[in-house]
Image: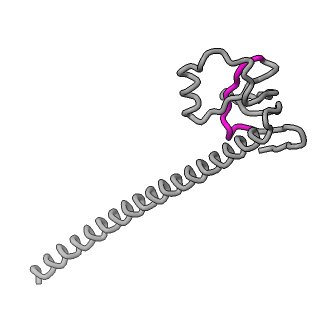
């Protein structure tokens, strides 16, 4: 009888240990699955944000191209978070000096667009997705 009890105690201990391991494994699996799903959701959100940024950039390019050399008003959020409004053109060769700098080329590679600020007598770089308002003649677009 004592051999049977000793055997049962060992079996009970093994079952409790197996249950704890299963619970631990299930918790680890659930955590890993939740982390994976969160990462996938973040990837999808980033992809949607990139698509929205591309659409806005194309819209801004289209609006500027539709001005056909006329001046336009552009309001955008600067890098420091403040608003800036310019009265500009995309091509205003009177202010062009030189052939461009490596810094300007680097900005273009990062997605910045250039325009000439007629009031400030200089070039301005802006991110298309940070544009708040565009106005040229009867065209008035708010983002």
Residue at (61%, 49%) from the top-left corner? Answer: 49
Locate residue 132 relative to residue 15 in the image: left or right.
right
In reply to whether residue 125 is colored magenta, the answer given is yes
Viewer-nearest residue: 117 or 69: 69
Residue at (80%, 21%) from the top-left corner? Answer: 118
Residue at (77%, 29%) from the top-left corner? Answer: 89
For the C terminus, the quadrant is: top right
Residue 46 vertical placement versus 25 (above, below): above
User: Residue 16: x percent and y percent?
Assistant: 27, 70
Residue 40 vertical placement versus 133 (above, below): below
Residue at (17%, 73%) from the top-left corner? Answer: 10
- Give the colour scheme shown: one colour
In reply to whether residue 129 is colored magenta, the answer given is yes
Residue extending farthest to the bottom is 1
Residue 9 vertical placement versus 24 (above, below): below
Residue extending farthest to the right is 138
Viewer-nearest residue: 117 or 100: 100
Q: Which segment is the magenta one? A: 121-131
User: Residue 35: x percent and y percent?
Assistant: 45, 56
User: Residue 62: x percent and y percent?
Assistant: 73, 44
Q: Quadrant of residue 108?
A: top right
User: Residue 115: x percent and y percent?
Assistant: 72, 28
Viewer-nearest residue: 70 or 121: 70
Viewer-nearest residue: 120 or 19: 120
For the N terminus, the quadrant is: bottom left
Locate residue 108 relative to residue 95 in the image: left or right.
left
């Amino acid at each position: 009888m004592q051999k049977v009890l000793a055997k049962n105690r060992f079996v009970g201990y093994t079952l409790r240990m197996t249950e704890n391991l299963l619970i631990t494994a299930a918790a680890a699996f659930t955590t890993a699955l939740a982390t994976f799903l969160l990462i996938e959701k973040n990837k999808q959100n980033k992809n949607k944000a990139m698509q929205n940024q591309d659409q806005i950039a194309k819209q801004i390019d289209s609006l500027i191209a539709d001005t056909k050399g006329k001046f336009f008003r552009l309001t955008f959020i600067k890098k420091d978070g403040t608003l800036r409004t310019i009265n500009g053109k995309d091509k205003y060769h009177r202010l062009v000096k030189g052939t461009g700098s490596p810094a300007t080329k680097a900005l273009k590679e990062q997605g910045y667009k250039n325009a000439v600020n007629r009031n400030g007598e200089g070039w301005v770089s802006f991110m298309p997705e940070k544009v708040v308002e565009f106005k040229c003649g009867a065209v008035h677009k708010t983002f």
